[in-house]
Amino acid sequence: MRGITRRGALRGCAAGMLAGYFSAPALLSAAHGLDIPLRPMRLVRRLERGMRDGAILAVERAWQIEFKPQGSGFAVLGQQVSVTVDAPRQLASIAEIERSRSTADMFPILLSANGVIAAAGQYTKHQDLAAAVREAETMIADRPIPAAAKSQQMLYLSQLQRTGTTFLKQLPRDLFFPAGEGMRAVRSVELPGGMSGEFEITYDARSKPGRGWLEYAVRRVVTRIGQSQRLSREVWSMSSI
């Protein structure tokens, strides 16, 4: 589950690639060695983020997508068709931003011949777990912290969660054609004042039986300090229209 890079490469060759998307034959799955959906599909992503008071901010988006042969791989073209936001009243302004945010820059998404994502629009930030730990430690060390232990803990937890959710700004590399291998990674974070925190990241996906493309995938990022924890979760699904 590594991050996606090369947004600049996408911009530089977009014109040439788009010409190829629509001139290529509709059925090249056998030649490419990968069974791809031949009709438009519905891709859905639901993102849930736990808040300080136990409330949940949830954003669900749906896109209509198509797979087009491109070179030795494929391109995924898409357009958002719906968005819903569930948020506590105090987060109304954030909810409105999410409702109005465009996802047009997400596409095109380029896949290799075996279905692994090679490049994608806005999902380009690389963030591995070791880098997230270093970023969290630096961010917390550089900020003034309230003296009360409970306030310290909750503020640290919020900052860890903010760092941890950068993982959800990347597309899983095998999103469209799951490799069938789940993952779990845990890393400790050293905090001032003798406190310690933790990131836990899990990812699991399954493919549609007999087809190989995405049916369901879930990724979780849990941040912990002591007995307190916050969960962020995203769920992907793809189905026929």
Image (cartoon, rainbow, N blue to C red):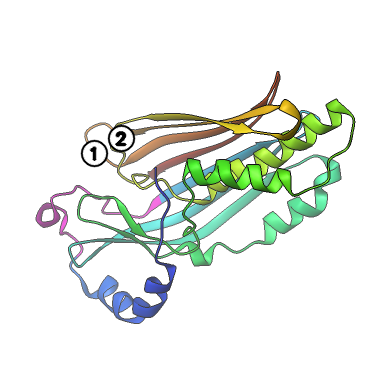
Q: Amino acid at mark 2?
A: Lys
Q: Is residue 46 left or right of residue 100?
A: left
Which quadrant would residue 55 be assigned to in this image?
top right
Instruction: Decide if residue 163 is in sight here.
Output: yes
Instruction: Decide if residue 58 is in sight here.
Output: no
Label 1 residue SS? loop
Residue 68 placed where, x, y %? 27, 63
Circle 1 crowding by C-alpha within 10 Å: few under 14, some 14–19, many from 20: few
| Location of mark 1 (residue) | 211
Residue 155 placed where, x, y %? 79, 37
Location of the N terminus (image quadrant): top left
Whether the magenta-drawn stretch holds residue 38 is answered as yes
Q: Are marks 1 and 2 in contact (CB under 8 Å)?
A: yes
Whether the magenta-drawn stretch holds residue 156 is answered as no
Residue at x 63% of width, y 43% of height = 136
Disc on res. 208: 2
User: What range is drawn magenta here?
Assistant: 26-41
Q: Is residue 220 left or right of residue 48?
A: left
Label 2 residue SS? loop
Q: Main secondary structure of the magenta part?
A: loop
Which quadrant would residue 147 be assigned to in this image?
top right
